[in-house]
Amino acid sequence: MIAVAALLLAAGFFAPAIVAGQVPVFRDFVNVFLPFRLYAAHALAHGRLPLWTREAAFGVPFLGNYQSAVLYPPSALIDLMPAPLGFGLYLAFHFWMAGLGMDALLRRRGLPPRARLLGAFVMMLGGIMISVTAGNHLSVVAWIPLSLAAAEDVAGAPRPARLAWLVGLLTLQVLAGAPETFAQSAVLVAVAACLARRRQRSGWSGVALVGLAGLLAIALSAAQLLPTAEYFAQTRRSAGLGAGLALENSLEPQTLLTLLSPHRLDGGIVTNIREAEVPIFWSIYIGIVPLALALIGCATRRGRRWALALAASLLLALGRFTPVYPLLYACFPWVLGTFRYPQKFLFTAHVAASVLAAVGFAWVEEHAARVREPIRRLLAGALLIATLVDLWAVHEPAMLFSDWDQLLGSTPRSLVEEGPDARIFQYEATPAGLEPWLPRFWIGGDLRARENELWAKLAMNVPLAYGVGYTNGFDSLSELRPAVGALYAALQGLPLPDALRLLRSLGVRFLVGEQRLDDPALAIVQRAGPQRSWIYRLEAPAPRIYLARRFRRLPSAPEAFRAMSQPSFQPGADVVLLDSPGGAERGEFADGSLRIADDGPESLSVVVETTGSALLVVADSYFPGWRAEIDGRPAAILRSNGDLARAVEVPSGKHSVSMIYRPESFRLGLTISCWALIALAVTLRAVRLVSLP
């Protein structure tokens, strides 16, 4: 019955997506989750594993971007189902798993059905779950309770089926695309296994198997993890974030007041924000009744360890507001500097609070033994209904939906029809120059209108949903690439004519922004209006693929961008190389012609015909894994135009030049994943033999 109740609750919460043709427009769902998943679904539908995207951020790894979650099995709901039905089923499925998992975890603690049902309600409709609906964290948090229950089973009495189930659950979490959330889950699983061993007075073999399950899960996910590690190594985050970024978005102490008086959305209008900045977790509210029950649960013997987990996670989530997290960062800067937002420790707090509320409910039921059974059932039912109504009333309005067809039709057709070659730059004009547009959210603003506006204006990653090229957005890793950072710094310090020349040289065709720009190089495509930005077309931008006639060698991206902004630099004819043929400082190449034979994200084939040595330039970033061939023979790739393009020197005559993206990291990762399957089968066989009587 709890499983059925949880299923109905999840389906009802996302009914607008499942049955009414609407899609959530809640926080990052619009500009991260939705376009990422649509891009992956489109690629897979055309028989292509999306290893690379040329549309985003001057070309970047797509599979290697952890947030893409291409290999996460439940993504098949989105890949195989039409939008928005697939998205509704995906979200409802994870909410259901969260409820089932909490039921399983509480059942192992001997809690009665009504207490387990209350714990499932809090787990599914508590503020943290609602807040993470917009991103990949949901896909990890939803599996935490089931993983804890499975770890306790393996640690207490190992069986092949139990071990296989645990490995599967952990693998799902690894592939889900939220590493910091999985790290919390892994710690909780390890602690749960150790406590289960102690509680059942069993040996350490079960705990060792739980650890082995974690290693197998990581090995099974190697096809995702190794490309991610390779991408990560190409960014500034690999050296660790500074204290300012690492401690950004700490949980403000006044946010704890929202446990009693939550944030609210009234018709899409955001109200009741006490914090200095909008928290990344829209709500931490768990309901008045569950909060009171959780406080009771903290005082019980059954709940004391969960109370400790709750206190520790809240302390870490406070980040810079206590000396604890800064001290830990000072001791382990590389570890904590890898992630942002201490608030994310609230995931552990949410699981702990759900358990403690159920424990408190069970304590109340146990100590109401003298009350007659009908009255006790009536009281328990009243508490359950009050919890459900309270959480639904607070959080259902926060799950904003918009009509999918209307949302799709709101984008400028003039840009969508351009495809990958559009290359849009979303700008903000400042007195010093141009900088990439960062959408801002104002307290008191209409959240639904804002999200619809972000989509209509092709903000952030929305172009990815249409296969349209764009320069800024994608994810935090792409923004931390040295070349992209150097480009943004250059644009912010250049006069408008020079900034436009630089963008033209990089193949940018359109500028989209809120401020009017006046320059003869710009033609107005769309004037600003309601849910409409200024759209400008740049005159004669460099083509994405061209033969360069002149080159100049400069040792760094900032110097390259300065040179590309000068009037002497001719877009589509000149190129700046970071490493030039023969080490020459500058030189010229012969004219020629090219014909594009095949143009895909991971492969490119061009026929070049020239009377002398030529240089083929492709305005797409270089990453490890790209290789070039001329007439089937390997050729060197020259990093060019500030490391945002690839170039190949082509000899005289007619030649077929190809570029292909086949990262060794993916091939090696896939091999490791296959061997891990064999290792899992051997391990299960060994466990079966040991467990036989």
Image (cartoon, helix red, strand yellow):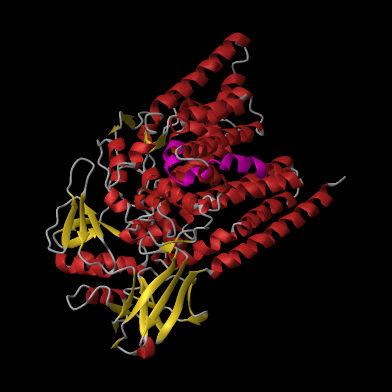
223 sits left or right of 472 in the view:
right
Judged left or right of residue 631, residue 550 is left
Residue 487 screen position, x and y as percent = 28, 67
Where is residue 574? Give x, y as percent.
Answer: 27, 78
Residue 140 located within the stretch drawn in magenta: yes
- Please, what is the dominant secondary structure of the magenta stretch? helix
Report whether residue 198 is seen: no
Q: Position of residue 315 (x, y in %)?
A: 44, 45
The quadrant where residue 562 appears? bottom left
The boundaries of the magenta stretch are 129-151
Please name whichever residue, 369 or 374, is drawn nearer the observer in this view of the structure: 374
Whether the magenta-drawn stretch holds residue 345 is answered as: no
> Which image quarter holds the C terminus?
top right
Instruction: Report the side of 7 relative to 648 (left or right).
Output: right
On-image quarter of the N terminus: top right
Q: Is residue 664 above or below residue 418?
A: below
Does the image show residue 227? yes
Residue at left offset 70%, top offset 48% = 164
Question: Which residue is drawn at the image coordinates 74% and 55% (left, top)?
Answer: 681
